[in-house]
Image (tube, rainbow, N blue to C red):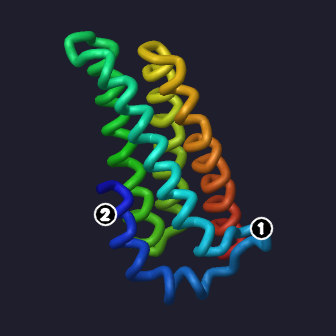
Amino acid sequence: MAGVIGSIFTARTVSSWYVALRKPTWTPPGSVIGPVWISLYLVMGIAAFLVWRKGLEYAGVRIALLLFLVQLVINTLWSAAFFGLASPLAGFVVIVILWIAIVATIIAFMRVSLGSGLLLLPYVSWVSFAGVLNWSILIINR
C-alpha cells in the first residue's frame, strides 16, 4: 500500500514538474525506478514476514514491526513531500528521516532474525542513492 499511495503523488507531477527539473546525468530512467521499487517492496515484505514469524508475544518482534511500519509511512511521505509538494527540499528532509528509520529497522530486525535485517540492506542502499540524487536535484535547481 505504501508504494501505491506514494505513486498517487508521483503520478500527478512526474510528467510535468519533475520533467522540467534539471537532473544529474546519472539519474536512473523511470523504466528502472518502478521495477526497483517493486523488488524492494517484495523483499521488505519477506523480511517483515521473517520477523513476524518469530511471534508477536516477543517485545523485540513488536518493536521491530512497529519500526517497519513507521518507516513505511515515512517512505510514503517522501513521495508526498518531493512530488506532491513539488519540493526537493522537503523531499530531502524526509529522506534523511527515512534513512534513519530504515537503519533503526534494520538493527531491530537483525536482533530478531539476522536474515531479515540483511534483506533490508538493498533497501537502505537504494534510499542512500535516492538521498544523494534528491540532494543533487535540490542543489542543481536552486
Q: Which mark is residue 139?
A: none
Above or below, comparing residue 112 to residue 32 in the picture: above
Residue position marked by numbered label 1 in the rendering: 26
Q: Residue furthest right?
A: 25
Q: Position of residue 134 (x, y in %)?
A: 61, 61
**Nearer the observer, 128 or 35:** 35
Q: Position of residue 90 (x, y in %)?
A: 47, 60
Near mark 1 (Cα within 10 A), the count class, few <14, some 14-19 or many ≥20, is few
Please identify the quadrant where the C terminus is shown. bottom right
Q: Is residue 133 left or right of residue 60?
A: right
Above or below, comparing residue 115 to residue 39 in the picture: above
**Nearer the observer, 139 or 115:** 115
Residue position marked by numbered label 2 in the rendering: 5
Q: Give the Cα distance between marks 1 and 2.
A: 26 Å
Q: Residue furthest left?
A: 57
Q: Amino acid at mark 1?
A: Trp
Q: Amino acid at mark 2?
A: Ile
Q: Position of residue 137 (x, y in %)?
A: 66, 68
Residue shown at 70%/75% (left/top)? 23
Residue shown at 65%/74% (left/top)? 29
Near mark 2 (Cα within 10 A), the count class, few <14, some 14-19 or many ≥20, is some
Residue shown at 44%/57% (left/top)? 78
Q: Is residue 34 left or right of residue 139?
A: left
Please tell me which of labels 1 and 2 falls first in the chain. Answer: 2
**Nearer the observer, 82 or 111:** 111
Displayed quadrant of residue 30? bottom right
Disc 1 secondary structure class: loop
Q: Is residue 80 left or right of residue 24?
A: left
